[in-house]
């Protein structure tokens, strides 16, 4: 759950509701309330321009298609004047949502910085390591102080081309998987809305984090994994 989005979108709808109620109180001839809701929702429908901001798709309304549709329907029933302000409220609500969405992206980035590994790993108490490649050792687990060691991990450049050649450029069909371990049961920071996939490098000194829109690589001089002894 992205708590920033939930709070801002809830606030936006409360503002729209308050403005609609204000319009309703000022009208001498009261409209039917459920038709008011429909007028606002239809007014939201618009032709929009979509662009990317902070790797997120953002829309801004350009043409009030819903408003034109309502005008075409209601003017024949002599109801346009009664519901006109609600239709315009619905259209301008697009700009309220746009403002809150853009603001929310920057607020989210400030609260949950993408360059901080603790944004994606805030708890390892229930986490486990599972091998995802035949080259992985099956008896690997976290070091006891793994969560403390994560403090030393810093974001590094992601060498995708180099890693690709390493994995698929081996001779005789031998592939070297750089991240043969997957972490399950870990938790991202509460309210961030992130559900990342977390891969650990062979030596335990690198962590690759994949989200719906990003891939981040964190590196440290300290390993967070160790081999479990099978000696009795």
Image: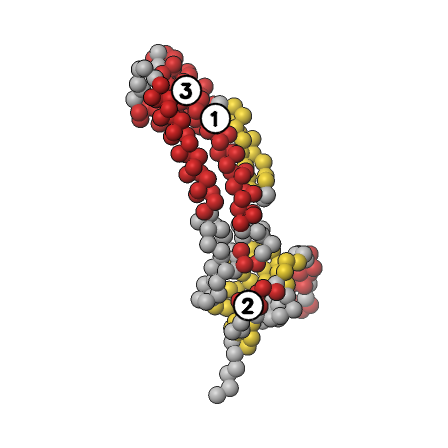
Task: Please identify, in this view, whether the residue under mark 3 or under mark 2 is nearer the observer.
Answer: 2
Mark 3, other Cα within 10 Å: few <14 / some 14–19 / many ≥20: some
Q: Which element carries disc 2, helix, strand or loop?
A: helix
Identify the residue at horizontal 43%, vertical 37% (top origin). 11
Mark 2, other Cα within 10 Å: few <14 / some 14–19 / many ≥20: few
| Residue 175 in view here | no
User: Who is closer to the viewer here, 163 or 229?
Assistant: 229
Distance from Cα at disc 1 to Cα at disc 2: 49 Å
Identify the residue at horizontal 57%, vertical 51% (top origin). 113
| Label of residue 92 in the image | 1
Q: Which residue is mark 2?
A: 148
Identify the residue at horizontal 56%, vertical 47% (top origin). 109
| Residue 18, x across and y down, in percent | 38, 29
Relative side of 57 to 166, left or right: left
| Label of residue 43 in the image | none
Q: Which residue is mark 3?
A: 85
Mark before the other along the chain sequence, 3 or 1: 3
| Residue 161, x across and y down, in percent | 69, 56
User: Who is closer to the viewer here, 171 or 110?
Assistant: 110
């Amino acid at each position: 759950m992205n708590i920033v989005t939930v709070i801002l979108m809830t606030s936006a709808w409360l503002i729209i509701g308050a403005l609609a109620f204000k319009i309703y109180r000022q009208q001498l001839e009261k409209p039917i309330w459920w038709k008011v809701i429909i007028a606002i929702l239809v007014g939201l429908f618009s032709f929009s321009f979509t662009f990317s901001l902070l790797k997120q798709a953002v829309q801004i309304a350009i043409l009030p298609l819903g408003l034109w549709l309502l005008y075409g329907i209601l003017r024949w029933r002599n109801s346009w004047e009664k519901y006109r302000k609600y239709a315009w409220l619905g259209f301008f609500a697009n700009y309220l949502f746009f403002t809150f969405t853009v603001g929310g992206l920057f607020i989210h980035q400030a609260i949950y910085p993408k360059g901080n590994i603790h944004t994606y790993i805030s708890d390892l108490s229930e986490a486990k390591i599972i091998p995802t490649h035949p080259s992985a050792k099956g008896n690997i687990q976290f070091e006891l102080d793994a969560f403390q060691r994560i403090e030393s991990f810093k974001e590094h450049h992601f060498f995708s081309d180099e890693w690709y050649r390493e994995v698929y450029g081996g001779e005789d069909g031998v592939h070297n998987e750089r991240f043969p371990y997957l972490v399950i049961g870990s938790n991202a920071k509460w309210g961030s809305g992130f559900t990342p996939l977390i891969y650990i490098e062979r030596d335990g000194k690198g962590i690759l984090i994949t989200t719906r829109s990003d891939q981040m690589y964190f590196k440290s001089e300290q390993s967070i994994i160790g081999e479990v002894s099978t000696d009795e």
